[in-house]
């Protein structure tokens, strides 16, 4: 079973996202808290808690046509293992 996470950000029509348009963590804000990951390296699906209202998801990029979904402008799909999502849910305080 696969989990699809919809991540909202800014997008240009060529799918390139200029670094200066991405949401930023402001100076003085606490760094994102690691909630769960599937391996010991930094190159695998991971979920972070940004603040009390949002999560940051690192996963495998997935095109909407690959998933058979219609994704609105400004949103992207990221695929992560379901076990990762369950582990993150258990870690949220």
Image: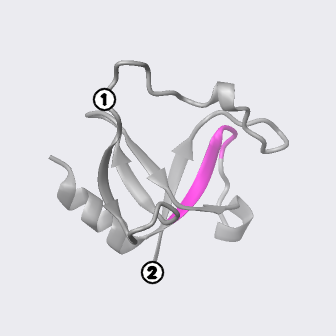
Q: Residue at x 65, y 33 (%)?
A: 10
Tell me how far mark 2 sits from mark 1, CA to CA: 34 Å
Q: For residue 77, what is the image quadrant?
A: bottom right
Mark 2 vs mark 1: which is more N-terminal? Answer: 2
Main SS type for the magenta part?
strand
Q: Helix or strand or loop: what does disc 2 sit on?
A: loop
19, above or below 88, in the image: above
- Front-lying residue, 43 or 16: 43
Tell me the number on the disc at residue 30.
Answer: 1
Residue 16: percent from the left, percent from the top?
A: 78, 41
Residue 5 left/right relative to 89: right
Residue 63 belongs to magenta span:
no
> Which contiguous range is marked in magenta?
72-79
Residue at x-position 19% and y-position 60%: 90
In this image, 53 relative to 57: left or right? left
Labels 2, 1: front one: 1
Residue at image mark 2: 1
């Amino acid at each position: 079973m696969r989990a699809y996470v919809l991540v909202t950000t800014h997008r240009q029509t060529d799918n390139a996202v200029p670094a200066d348009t991405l949401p930023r963590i402001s100076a003085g804000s606490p760094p994102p808290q690691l909630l769960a990951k599937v391996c010991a390296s930094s190159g695998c699906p991971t979920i972070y808690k940004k603040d009390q209202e949002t999560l940051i998801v690192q996963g495998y990029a997935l095109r909407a046509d690959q998933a058979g979904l219609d994704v609105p402008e400004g949103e992207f799909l990221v695929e992560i293992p379901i076990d990762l999502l369950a582990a993150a849910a258990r870690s949220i305080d």
